[in-house]
Amino acid sequence: MSELKGKIVAITGGGTGIGEGIAKKLASLGCRVAIGGRRIEKLETVAGAIESETPVFCHTIDVADTDSVKAFFAAVKSHFGDPDILVNSAGINIQKRTMAEMSPEDWDRVMQINASGAYRCIYEVLPAMRERHDGLVVNISSVAGKRAITLGGVVYCASKFAMTALGTAISNEVRNEGVRITNVYPGEVNTPILDNRPAPVSQEHKDSILQPEDIAEVVATICALPPRANVPEVVVKPTKQEWV
């Protein structure tokens, strides 16, 4: 994938889970990677563990806060330049996932991060991509953005459906301007978000489902496609997970 060498990649949620896995993979392929998250210590630990030609750049970002989003992308632009690729991987879920248990504050928090956060980040990078007629946005959604599953819960499903519509609508708008949007829908993945499951998840189960590096391989393949080729959406699930 030599065509990725030198590409500038901005990854939100890059300090853990899928975002971390994608950062490691793309950095290994020669990309200039910037990772963002709320904890600078975690970001620096991840960056320090990645062996790459260009050191991984770290900067805090809270995708629920407009000023924080602007500061992150300003820092990336100052350090590397405008991103060629944006990976929206920041996301959360809650433990109390039913309408009966969930509070309005929980709804607002999840929607602000999972849906509005993705919008804010795309808003920052899209003008430069449109101007140069080249760019790729990868939204790390969930199978809960394709099927309103009980396991995901009410607000998580709603936020991921919103992310689906966001990516699809923007992709249709910019398709003649050289900009591509891909929605990725992972099934169960062994990431820290499992810690917010209503019921504890065993290590045996974690080992049997997708790992972050599995999603990273798919994302790397999408990123390496020629500009004429766009993958609108892709579902990646554990072999053992049902798909209906």
Image: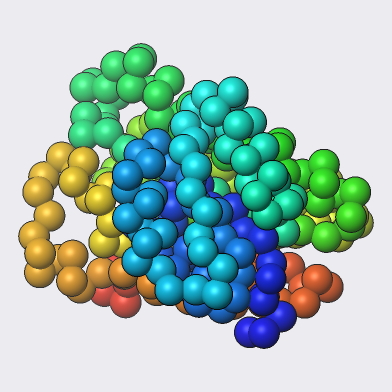
Nearest the eye: 59 or 181: 59
Give the quarter of the figure containing the N terminus.
bottom right
Q: Quadrant of residue 21?
A: bottom left
User: Residue at image x 62%, y 59%?
Assistant: 9
Residue 70, image x and y in percent? 64, 31
Residue 19 locus on image (x, y percent): 44, 56
Task: Name the residue furthest bottom.
Answer: 2
**Can I make out residue 235 in this image?**
no
| Count of numbered marks | 0
Q: Is residue 222 left or right of residue 188?
A: right
Outermost residue toward the top in this view:
104
What residue is shown at x 81% (from left), y 51% (from top)? 129
Instruction: Identify the residue shown where x is 67% and y is 61%.
Output: 8
Q: Is residue 118 left or right of residue 25?
A: right
Percent x, y of residue 240: 26, 74
Question: Residue 67 appears at what percent x and percent y?
Answer: 59, 23
